[in-house]
Image: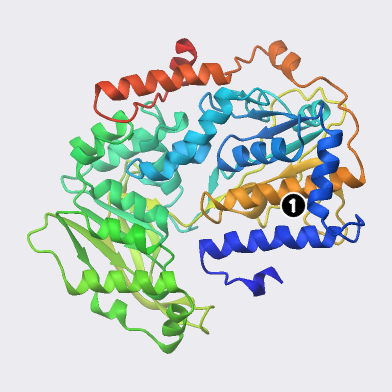
Amino acid sequence: ACNNFVRRDTSRGDTLKRMVRTKLLHALLRDVVPSAHTAAWCRAYATEASSSRRFAVVGSGPAGMYAALALTKTFDGSVVDVFDRYPTPFGLVRFGVAPDHAETKLVTNKFHETLTTRDDIRFYGNVQLGRDVSVGELYDGYHGVILAYGSSGDRTLDVPGEAELEGVMSAREFVAWFNGDPEHGPESATHNAVVRALTSTPKPHVAVIGVGNVAIDCARILLRDKSELAKTDICEHALDVLRRHPVEKVSVIGRRGVAQASFSPKELREVLGLPDVRVVIDDEEFGLAPEDEADLAASRPRRRAYDVLLKAHQSPKTNASKVLNFRFKTSPLEFGGDSNGNLRSMKLGRNELVGAAGARKAISSGETETVDTAMALRSVGYRAEPIVVSVNDESTSQIVLPFDERERVVPNEYGAVLTSPDKSTAKQIPGLYVTGWLKRGPTGIIGTNLTCAEETVAKMASDFARLPPPEPTSSGVDAALVKRAVRVITARDWAKLDAHERALGESRGKPRVKLTSIAEMLTIV
């Protein structure tokens, strides 16, 4: 019903669908709870029974923080422990939002205040699920557990040379590199790969494969004036490399047409408006079949994005030293390298579009060409990964988290974890829930996580109203973390790190200088 109620093709539509689903959930619960105001009834029940409730949330990005806030609002008097594998909180906002989009990061102000001023939401940084603590140990130690650790993997193109050649990487890794993710810092394989790619030729050509906002972010960071980037919180090691080895040509490549591209008009205007950047798009890209016209008519954002591109094509900049080339109906077929295993070229295939409006598919036309390419950034989607467990699980429950390999999510119903993806036979695991990308897949915007978390917590409240959770069999996981010599970073520790980064930034005329070494972070606190 929700999918028919709201159009599928916009982020706002995804958010509205989730809001409608939450309302439908409340309506369905009236069959269980004899009240015309089910949500209020559940909240009243939760408030009455939750004065000593303890909850665990794994992940401190928007999904996790919104879940923590929803829990304390729904279960009055409860305490929520928020776990994150890094000493620094805020997940994808810190490591995934582009440094020149400071306004998007303002949501962390509320999250920072939540962690540093409230006693009912506590931060457990530098604690990784699977390495330092098991799902079962969290399950035994809390009345309820919500997993919100997102997607740490990438979809692949599955073409020759993609996995073997250095210089072919995911856009997620590249974004993490310039945003200060410790796994992709100045000592990482990602850093070395970027440096080697950009130094392999005097004028490196970078291909970004994908036509979403992450692809546009990558193109913009590569082409933006580095004196402007220096005023942002871009990491010093990345800025130094981009300054020393400037990129003058970027190609954005999409397998379908301009009418099916998914970048937003705002992101597009920003990159097209960069000074000293000439936009190149072939005339034939704007030739639309009736099905493509119908796709544009069905989506206002896509129509606006099309108009923005058309305007840039019709009014090209002159005397620009950099080039941004948009290539639609084009697919990478193979990556070619040298004898040292470095990317040197990319074989491209031209596509034709077939199928009805709303279901256009790209098929090969047989036409191919090879272009010199120093670095290729794959931006075709994130994907969640199963938990890698290395810790000795000392739990009583011995919970093993189910995972849907096809959909790349934890199987769930309204956020309640199911024993298997087959909902016809699956059973709910009481007290275990998911939210965010781990629940719905990598879709939506930051605000989508708010309604997603509220839906999960509403489901938890209704479950607890029908069947109150048993008391935890342990008193949390503090003793296990001490036993394993895990250096837990608290909210007070994070406040020290935050102040340190801001002080470094102030001395250099930028918001902050992000620390990229966990070892260095631990010495500061």
| Residue under the image location 85 percent in, 58 percent down | 29
Secondary structure of residue under mark 1: loop
Query: Residue 93: x, y in percent?
Result: 47, 40
Other residues around mark 1 within 10 Å, as few (<14) / some (14–19) / many (≥20): many
Does the rendering let one see residue 256? no
| Residue under the image location 30 percent in, 77 percent down | 285
**In the displayed structure image, the side of residue 261 where residue 412 appears, left or right:** right
List the residue tagged with mark 1: 411
| Residue under the image location 85 percent in, 54 percent down | 426
Does the rendering let one see residue 198? yes
**In the displayed structure image, the side of residue 364 where residue 372 appears, left or right:** left
- Is residue 361 shown above or below 224? below
Query: Residue 22: x, y in percent?
Result: 71, 57
Query: Residue 158: x, y in percent?
Result: 50, 57
Q: Quadrant of the N terminus?
A: bottom right
Question: What amino acid type is highlighted by mark number 1?
Answer: Pro
Residue 199 lies in what quarter of the image? top left
Query: Residue 171: x, y in percent?
Result: 41, 48
Disc count in the image? 1
**In the displayed structure image, the side of residue 271 where residue 351 appears, left or right:** right
| Residue under the image location 26 percent in, 34 percent down | 239
Query: Is residue 64 or residue 517 the one in the foreground?
Result: 64
Query: Is residue 277 or residue 301 the one in the foreground?
Result: 301
Residue 393 lies in what quarter of the image? top right
Q: How is the image coloured?
A: rainbow
